[in-house]
Image (spheres, rainbow, N blue to C red):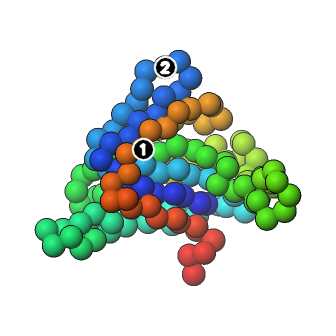
């Protein structure tokens, strides 16, 4: 699994013509599921997201996690994180999981994140969305469960 994790002062997602779903200070997480991913990738990514120390202490050092601060999470599925642009001009998505498999693992990730008790907002799987991100810092971290070790 891959994730782009951004520390934000606020964020939101709007799914088609529905009301905007906002968060205040916390993390916006864009998640892609690969065809080789399984439950261990879900657990790895959930642990990293919840425990990444990317929030500053009084001295400006990254010493706090989203869990430490009780921030909010906005998590959006984004299969394009598996776009391979090395050949040609159009991304290839052959390494992305099939939609039904990706949805299962994405839902498991959401369940793991919900267990933290943090306020969680999501988009909708396989739906056109607008995502607003007010990146604070800016701080952007790339996670890839296959590069864990």
| Of the pair 62 and 47, the residue shown nearer to us | 62
Q: Is residue 115 left or right of residue 69?
A: right
Q: Nearer the viewer, mark 1 or mark 2?
A: 1
- Is residue 121 shown above or below 97? above
Identify the residue at horizontal 59%, vertical 60% (top origin). 2
| Of the pair 127 and 89, the residue shown nearer to us | 89
Q: Dot 2: what SS?
A: loop
Which residue in the protein does label 1 denote?
A: 133
Q: Is residue 89 left or right of residue 68?
A: right
| Of the pair 78 and 115, the residue shown nearer to us | 78
Q: Quadrant of the C terminus?
A: bottom right
Identify the residue at horizontal 60%, vertical 75% (top origin). 147
Dot 1 or dot 2: first in sequence order is 2
Q: Quadrant of residue 10?
A: top left
Q: Quadrant of residue 42?
A: bottom right
Which residue in the protein does label 2 denote?
A: 18
Give how far across and how far down residue 93 sits, in percent: 78, 52
- Is residue 67 shown above or below 133? below
Q: Is residue 114 visible?
A: no
Identify the residue at horizontal 44%, vertical 61% (top origin). 140
Q: Dot 1: what SS?
A: strand
């Amino acid at each position: 699994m891959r994730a782009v994790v951004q520390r934000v002062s606020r964020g939101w997602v709007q799914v088609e013509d529905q009301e905007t779903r906002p968060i205040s200070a916390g993390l916006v997480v864009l998640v892609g599921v690969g065809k080789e991913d399984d439950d261990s990738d879900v657990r790895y990514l959930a642990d990293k997201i919840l425990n990444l120390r990317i929030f500053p202490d009084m001295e400006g050092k990254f010493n706090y996690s989203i869990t430490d601060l009780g921030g909010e999470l906005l998590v959006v599925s984004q299969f394009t994180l598996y776009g391979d642009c090395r050949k040609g001009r159009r991304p290839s998505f052959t390494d992305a999981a099939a939609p039904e498999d990706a949805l299962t693992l994405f839902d498991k990730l959401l369940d793991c994140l919900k267990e933290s008790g943090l306020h969680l907002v999501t988009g909708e799987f396989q739906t056109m969305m607008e995502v607003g991100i007010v990146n604070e810092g800016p701080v952007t971290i790339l996670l890839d469960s296959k590069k864990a070790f």
